[in-house]
Amino acid sequence: MNRHHIPSHCLAPVSEWMTWAQAGEVVVCEGERFEKSGYSNRYRIATANGPLLLTIPIVGGRGTKLPMHQVSICYQHDWRRQHTASWKAAYGRSAFFLHFGDLLLSVLCSGEKSLSVLNRALLLQCAGLLGLELSFTFSLQPLPLESKAMRADPRPYRQVFADRYGFLPGMSIIDLLFNEGPEGAWLLRQG
């Protein structure tokens, strides 16, 4: 079993999950600084209009330089309603949204104040729903320098709007989960 260090992600892309599934042991470095252009508070879903980037707003905005474990979620605007409506529009017809959608939305919309705690809950919930046997450790340390790795795009899997756009890589793990269900774990392990 290999150990892989990652920053705290919000519903990371399938390609990231492939790396983790093949490593087996994942250390989430919540001491890493917030990345304004990364996946700390953003994720991409496949919609009828193409890819959509959804963002969880944070206190202090994108310019914050805090470590992830100190970043708070901003609730001044009702972003949860937008995310919920976007999920339902994008995945309402997918094979597994009925099975997993409400469960994951209840985590996303829980009112959690800490971004890293929300990311952790979503990470563990997705891993459990996929049936992935991954070992997760959460650390307040920043990422080790040698932890940067190249990510490969996953092999195509079923997507709701593939007839319009073909396969869209770079989508959040929820895209794989809602379209393939627990069978998505096989794709992650195979790379």
Image: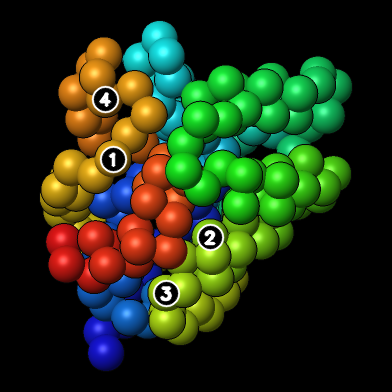
Left or right relative to 79: residue 130: left
Q: Quadrant of residue 182?
A: bottom left
Which tag is nearer the camera, tag 4 or tag 2? 4
Q: CA distance from mark 2 to mark 3?
A: 9 Å
Mark nearer the N terminus (3 vs 1) = 3
| Neighbours of disc 3 within 10 Å: few (<14), some (14-19), many (20+) | some
Question: Label 2: which residue?
Answer: 126
**Which residue carries the number 1 mark?**
158
Separation of residues labelled 3 and 1 (CA atoms): 19 Å
Q: Is residue 78 above or below residue 178?
A: above
Place residue 111 in its image quadrant. top right
Count neighbours of disc 4 (C-alpha within 10 A) and say few if under 14, some if 14 to 19, many if 20 or more: some
Q: Are marks 4 and 2 in contact (CB under 8 Å)?
A: no
* Residue at the disc numbered 4: 162
Q: Is residue 34 left or right of residue 27?
A: right
Answer yes or no: do the residues labelled 3 and 1 have beta carbons within 8 Å? no
Pick whichever, 20 or 81, lies toward us: 81
The residue under label 3 is: 132
Q: Position of residue 91 (x, y in %)?
A: 51, 31
- Mark identifier at residue 182: none
48 horizontally vs 79: left or right: left
Q: Is residue 72 something one can see in this rendering?
A: no
Q: Are marks 1 and 4 in contact (CB under 8 Å)?
A: yes
Which residue type does callout 3 highlight?
Leu
CA separation, marks 1 and 2?
18 Å
Is the residue marked by circle 1 packed among few (<14), some (14-19), or many (20+) residues within 10 Å?
some
Name the amino acid, label 1. Answer: Arg
Q: Residue furthest top?
A: 49
Visible residue check, residue 4: yes
Q: Earlier in the sequence, mark 2 or mark 3?
A: 2
* Rendering coords of residue 4 (x, y %): 32, 73
